Image: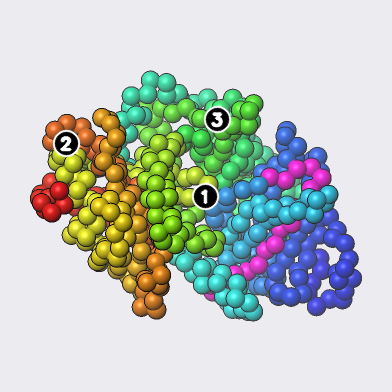
Amino acid sequence: MLLSGEPADAAGAPRREGTALTSGYEMGEVQMCHTVYPWHSNHLGELSAGQLLTWIDTTACLAAERHAGVACVTASVDDIQIEETARIGQQICIRAKVNRAFNTSMEVGIKVAVEDPFTNSQKHVCTAFSTYVVKPLKAKKVNLKPVRLQFAQDHLEYSLAAERRRIRLYHEDSYNNLMEDSCTFYDADWEKDSNKISTDCTRVESIELVLPPHANHQGNTFGGQIMAWMETVANISASRLCRTHAILKSVDMFKFRGPSTVGDRLVFRAIVNNTFQKSVEVGVRVEAYNCEEWTEGKPRHINSAFLIYQAFDANKEYIMFPRVKASTKDSIRRFRGAIARRKIRVARKYILSNKPEKPISIPWDKCNQAYLSYNNVATLAFLASSDGWELTSTKKNIQVFTQEENDVLTIKIEMQVKVQASQAYLLLSDLGLRPRWDVHYLSCDILESAGDDDKIFYVTCPPVKQSSTRDLVMLMSRRYPCKNGDPYVVAMRSVTLANCPPSVQYVRSEVQCAGFLIYRQNNDECQVTYMNQLTSGIMPYIEENLTGWSNSIQETASACIRFLETAKVCTTLL
């Protein structure tokens, strides 16, 4: 290992495979580089997920111990989204750094990249966050020193670490809240599906004897080795369901509940919990036995994790997983638990994402008005016709769906309303009325009109999370149905106007694609579908809903239904 401040054959020296070093320009950062050899790979010639998890844990542990000055053990590993694979002959570079210290625990941020030696290109593989706790000698108490913040990115990660810690601490409560909601969850399509299959065939049990090579430098079973073994049994379980080789796409928080040592027998049990169209969740439980416990049949539960897999067919297209049965008490618990965890996982992915967003507002002027209006309506229609919607919540006359596509999260709310479709259309297309039923709208005023069916609105929204009041400039385009069966359309997207620039009084937010589709069902009933491609400016208003702490989406939908069923259309709108 090469430490910052040591001289310096590191300046210009080639990287050595399998070495860990710290960069001289950022104290406390540890970097590990490996070349991917055949013995690191899977059947596809790609770096195996288990090996990647092992290297991640090793690098993060070294970073934690460098900061603490004493031995550290893994407490948990947050969600990991694997975005890229590494092939034999390519190089994996893992960088780990302590983001923030909390008394006796600390968060370590890990970034993994793959480099191709022939093209000199580099791609991002994944980002991970691990929590480590100190393991002092004897009864010595250790209070961790604060992290030294040098750069703007250090300050950002330091701040976000507190938010991630808050989410970890409240994870169990969020999960329990969502499990309570799932008791009333009803998916009509799932109930009608006669091709549901049992997950009994996906049960996998495997045992490992912990030998000295499996132990870390503290004598405990290496956390990365346990994660690798867990991935192996989970992969087998997922592969049995899809009848091909499954590929790990994400990990839902490893939790280390207790240690194990050399000589322990580790029993791994895996089973498919639920499927979500193009992905499947596998739960893994790890129990440890020493010799006496093994004889008496008294296990220690030391780890649990939930791993998400996908699979490809011969044409490299994602396989659609079949729905699974949930008939026994245990299978129903696992089935509902997977739905709750998916909600939390999606929320964490988008709420904690700090990827910079490109501006999406387009200038509104006379030369592009027709194009923008067409694009506004067409984008909403295309979004409505897309696949991959997953039902996440049900309530009387309300269903909530989510969709993930190209790292964009979209929500869809379907409402059954006892009112004529034409009346609902006129009421919803008058955005000036929206503050009457939507608490997220403080005001909504017309800035400019381009005919009866295209208008620019200026919207103000209440502050959230101690931030300033937000504002938006939106193009609203409305269209009548072209033929029977077509919906009424009310589409919205952000634009910029020269005479309405951002001000210091408000935080300017943006809407990428949102709006209503109103379908006539009979003379006095219609279905109102609302969709919104979530942006960083919109996410704060619904993130507590996504994590199970609020029902704001359902409450707003209920308010919309009440408004539509009781309001009268002003004759000036007709």
Q: Is residue 111 visible?
A: yes
* Amino acid, disc 1: Asp
Mark 1 lies on a secondary structure that is: loop
The disc, 3 or 2, on the residue closer to the chain's N-terminal end is 3
Q: Position of residue 249 (x, y in %)?
A: 58, 43
Residue toward you, 481 or 404: 481
The residue positioned 51% from the left and 30% from the top of the image is 320
Q: Is residue 363 one of those drawn in magenta?
A: no
Query: Furthest-top residue in view?
Result: 194
The disc, 3 or 1, on the residue closer to the chain's N-terminal end is 3
Q: Nearer the viewer, mark 1 or mark 2?
A: 2
* Amino acid, disc 3: Ile
Mark 3 lies on a secondary structure that is: loop
| Residue position marked by numbered label 3 in the rendering | 319
Mark 2 lies on a secondary structure that is: strand
Could you tell me how many numbered marks the image carries? 3
Vertical relation: 272 (above or below) 380: above
Q: Position of residue 292 (x, y in %)?
A: 61, 43
Q: Nearer the viewer, mark 3 or mark 1?
A: 1
Label 3: how many residues lie within 10 Å, few (<14), some (14-19) or many (20+)? some
* Amino acid, disc 2: Glu
| Residue position marked by numbered label 1 in the rendering | 407
| Residue position marked by numbered label 2 in the rendering | 525
Question: What segment carries the magenta color?
Answer: 85-103
The residue positioned 79% from the left and 42% from the top of the image is 88
Calculate the distance from the C-alpha at mark 3 to the C-alpha at mark 2: 38 Å
Q: Position of residue 165 (x, y in %)?
A: 49, 65
Q: Is residue 91 one of those drawn in magenta?
A: yes
